[in-house]
Amino acid sequence: MAVTTMIGAKIHRREDPRLITGRGRYVDDMKLNGMLHVGFVRSPYGHARIRSIDVTDAAKAPGVVAVYTARDFEGLLQGEMPVTISFVPDKKQPIGWAFIAKDEARYHGEIVAVVLAREKSQAADATALVSVDFEPLPAVVDLDKAVESKSPTAHTGIPDNVAWDMTVGAGDVDAAFADADVVVKQRILQQRLFPIAMEGRAVLVEYVPFDNRLTMWTSSQVPHWVRLCLTLAMGIPESNIRIVAPDVGGGFGSKIHIYPEEYLAAAASKLSGRPIKWTEGRSENLQATHHGRAQIFDIEIAAKKDGTLLGYKVRQYVDTGAYVSVFSSFQCSAYAIAEGAYDLKNVKFQTVGILTNTTPTDAYRGAGRPEATHAIERGIDLVAREIGMDPVEIRRKNFSKFPHSNYLGFAYDTGDYDKALTKALATVGYDAFRQQQKELRAKGRYLGIGLSTWIEVCGFGPSAVTAANEPLALVESSSVRLHPTGSATVYVGTSPHGQGHATTFAQIAADTLGLPYDAIDVRTSDTGDTPFGYGTYGSRSLHVGGSAVLMSCRKVVDKARKLAAHMLEASEEDVAFDQGRFYVKGSPDKAKTMGEVAFAAHRDNLPEGMEHGLEAVTYYDPPDLSWPFGTHICVVEVDPETGAVDLQRYVAIDDCGNVINPMIVEGQVQGGVAQGIAQALFEEVIHDAETGQLRTGTLLDYSIPGTGEIPVIECDRTITPSTTNPLGAKGIGEAGTIAASPAVINAICDALSPLGIKHVDMPASPDRLWKQIQEARAHANGSKEAHQ
Amino acid sequence: MKHKVSTTVNGSRHEHEVESRLLLVHYLRDEVGLTGTHIGCDTSQCGACTILVDGKAVKSCTMFAVQAEGKELTTIEGMAKDGVLHPLQQAFWDEHGLQCGYCTPGFIMAAAYLLSQNPNPTEDEIRRGLEGNLCRCTGYVNIVKSVQAAAKTMGGAKAKTGEQQAATRRA
C-alpha cells in the first residue's frame, strides 16, 4: 500500500489560478461564429389564459431573426419536463409541465415566446414588443387557502391543488401520546428562498444539421442528465450530443436539473440553424430558476417529565409552485431524518405537496434535511422549555446510541453525537456563558445560546436503498488512464461548481497510484470524455464519486503489480507496492516505479495474455448511505428596542468521517452556515397574495447577507469514519445549511425567553422580532394588570 | 447613434465605437474581450463587476462605457504582472478565499482599492470595505482572511516569484 501523503493534507486548489486571474471560462465568456442571442418572453401574471400572441412588431425589430411560440416547437420537442417521483409513491395526479406555455401560464416568469436576435440587447428589446393577450385568472398563492375545497385551482381543470399526500410512520404513535406527561405543538414556517448562485444559468448551444450533432455548454450540476433529457426530447442519439459544464459559478441545487430554457435553446438552434446563446439576468433568475424551501411544518412531540421523548407527529406542507419539478420530491426526504439525532421510534410523518401559481420549488442546499432538522431541533428545545430542562441535558438524554437504525429502518453507518456536542460546549464555554447570561439578564440584556445537534443522510444513492422504490441507483463513475511517461488522467462523472474535485480527486489518485500529485489531471463535466455520472448534489460527490476514483486506481495498481512482477521476474504475490514503487518483498532497492510500469505497459514484452495499457473504469454503487453529524452553537444578543440580532459567536463542530482536504471541508461548512444564517435572519421570497406576482423581484428586494452580516465561523471537527465507502468519508457540502438555522433561532428564543417568547419564525428580521417583543410585553403588562 | 470611446485597459490603449447605452462592464467583456469581470446581478448589488477606474473601485455596471473616455481601467486580468500573482491573488489562493470563483475578481478588485487607501485595515474595516460585494460560497470568513494576509504581504516582504509560488502549492 502507498503511504498516505496527500489524503488529509491542506493542498492548494488547482482550480484557483485561472479563477483568480480572470481566466476562468464560464458559459457567458464564450462565443461562436454566427451565434444568435435568445430572449424569453415571460408571463407577468401568476395565472393567466393566453388568448393570443402577436409577434408582428417583434419580428420587424432591428436584428431580430425569428420569433417562436409554442406551436413552432411542436414535433421538435417530445413530451414534457421530466419528474422523478421516487420519494412520492402516493402522488395523486400527474401535473404536466410543458417546455413552453401554450394556452395557460401558471407562474410569473413562465415562458410564452422566444425571440432570436443578432445582439443580446436587440433580443431584449424585441421581447418587449411581443404582444401577448393575457386574461388574468385567479391565482393560488397561500398554502392554507389552497387546500380549502372552494379554492381556485393552480391549473384550469384539475380537481384540487394537492400534488401528493403521503404518510410514513412506525411504532405506536397514539400510545406514545397517550402516555405523555407533556405534548408540545408548534407550527414552523420554512419561508421560500432563492438559491442565487452568483452566476445565473447560461446556455450556449450549437446544432449542426446533416451531421445531426448537438453541442451545449451549460451552467449545470448534471451534464449527463442534461444529455439524457435532450436525447429523449429531441430524438438525437446520445452519442451525437455533447454537454459541457465549464466553470460553473455555484449551484446550491438550482442547477440540478434541466430547465425549459435549455430545451428551447437547443430546439431554437435546430430551427434557426444557428448557434444560440442565453445568459440569464438576475431578475430573470429570480423568476425562472427554481426556488427552495416554501414549506410549513406542524409538529407535535410527546415527552415524559424527565425529558424522554416518546413520540413525534409531523405534517409537512410543501409549496411545489406551479409544477412538480424534477427533484421536488427531494424536499420530502425530510421524512428520512425526521427524528434527527434522537432515539424516537414512534413517529408519523405526513407530507403534502400543494400546487400554487408560483415558480416551482426544488432542491436548495440540503433539500428536505434543513427543514427536518429545523423542526426537530426547535421541537426538542420547546419540550426542554416546557419541562424546565437544559437543552444540552435533554439532547444527551435522547441521543441515539450506536449501532442504530431509525424509525424507518435505515441503519446509520457510524456516529458519536455526544463527542461532537461535548467538544462544541467546551469550545463555546457553555457553563461560563450561562453564568454571564444570568448576570446580564439582571441588567436587562437579552443574550441567548442555541444548539443544533444535527444529522444528515447523504451519499445518494445506493441501489440497496433505492431499489424499494424504483430501479434507479445513483452510482458514480470514474475512469483512470495512465499515460506512457507516467502521468494519469482521471475522468469522473461528478460535476463540480466550486467544490474542488480536481484537487481532492487528484489527492486520492496520487496516493493510490503512487504518482506525484502534479502528474494527475482530473477531468469533469464534459459528456464527450467522462463516463456517465449523476452529477454533484446532495453531498454525494466524495462518498460515491471519490470512492469510484479510489476503486479505479486500485484496479490499475492490480494490473500494474502483475506487470511489475513480470519485469522483476518474480511471482505477483511476492511483489510489494509502496509509495509508487513495486519491488520484491525484502529487496526494496531493486524497484520499478509506477511510471516505469506505465511505460512498459505500452511496449512489447508484456506477460502472456496481457493487453497493452493501464486503464480502469468503475461504476461505484456504495453498499449504503452515510450519516454525518455535528453540533453547532450560536450565541446572540437581541436588542429589545430595535429587534436587531447581534450574532456574537458561531461554533461548528462537524463530523464527516475521514477528511481528504481539511481546507475544503472547512470552506464548505463556512459557506453552508452562511446560507443557514441567511435563512434564519434575512432572506424571504414574497409573492403577491392575490396575483401571484413576484414582489421580491430584484436583489434590491431580497437581502443576501454580506461581509457585515456573517460572523467569524469557528470550525473544528471530530472524526468518526464511515463504514459505507472505502474512503471512510461522509458528505459535508450541505452540513452547514442543515445545522445553522435552528442554532440561530434557538439562540434567539433562548434570549427572549424572559419575555415568554417560545418560538420565532424565519426570517427573524428586526421588524418581526420587534413586533413579537412588543406583543409579549403588552401581554405581560396585561397579565400584571389583571392580577392587580 | 454610436460614440467613439478610447480607454486604457491594463496599460493597453483601446478605441471602439459604442452605443450610448452600453454599460462599462459589457464594453470590457464584449468589446475589449476581457471576460474576467463578471456580472452577478442587474441592480448593482453584487459587486462581481468591480474594477478600478483611475485607481478607484467602481462597479462597472454603474457606468456607461462612454463615461470611461480617457480613463485608466484596471481589471482582474491586469493584476498579475510578469508571471507573478498580485499578493491579493496569492492570498485568495493560500487562504481558500474562493470556491466557485465567480465573485472573486470583484472581491479582489474591491480589496485592492481598500488596501490602497488603508494598508493595514482591521477586520472590521475589511468587512466594511467589502460590503458592496456578495459571495454565496464562502461565508466571507476566508475572504476576510485573504485580505488580512495580503495586507501583511504588501506591507512587508516583496511579492513571491513564480518559482516560490509553485513551491507554496503544497503547504
Image (cartoon, coloured by chain):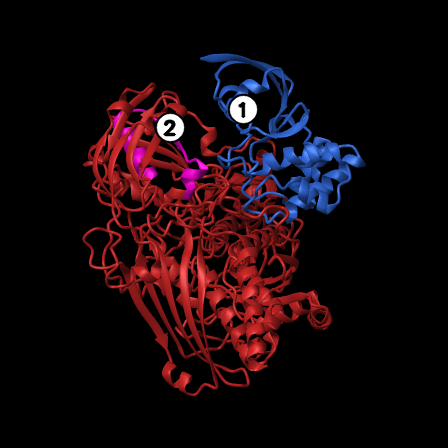
Chain colours: A red, B blue
- Residue A609: x and y in percent read 40, 47
Q: Residue furthest right?
A: B156
Using a 10 Å C-alpha cutoff, classify the residue at mark 1 as few (fewer than 14 neighbours), some (14 to 19) or many (20 or more). Answer: many
B58 sits left or right of A107 in the view? right
State the extent of the magenta-drawn residues as a range.
Answer: A261-286
| Residue B44 seen in the figure | yes
The answer to whether the residue labelled 1 contacts the one labelled 2, judged by CB atoms less than 8 Å apart, is: no
- Residue A676: x and y in percent read 53, 56
- Residue A26: x and y in percent read 48, 34
- Residue A635: x and y in percent read 65, 63
* Residue at x 38%, y 65% (from the top left corner): A316
Q: Is residue B52 magenta?
A: no
Q: Amino acid at mark 1?
A: Leu
* Residue at x 60%, y 73% (from the top left corner): A418
Where A484 falls versus A620 (above or below)? above
Would you name the residue on which mark 2 appears?
A: A124
Q: Chain of mark 2?
A: A
Q: Is residue A280 magenta?
A: yes
Mark 2: secondary structure: helix
Q: Amino acid at mark 2?
A: Ala
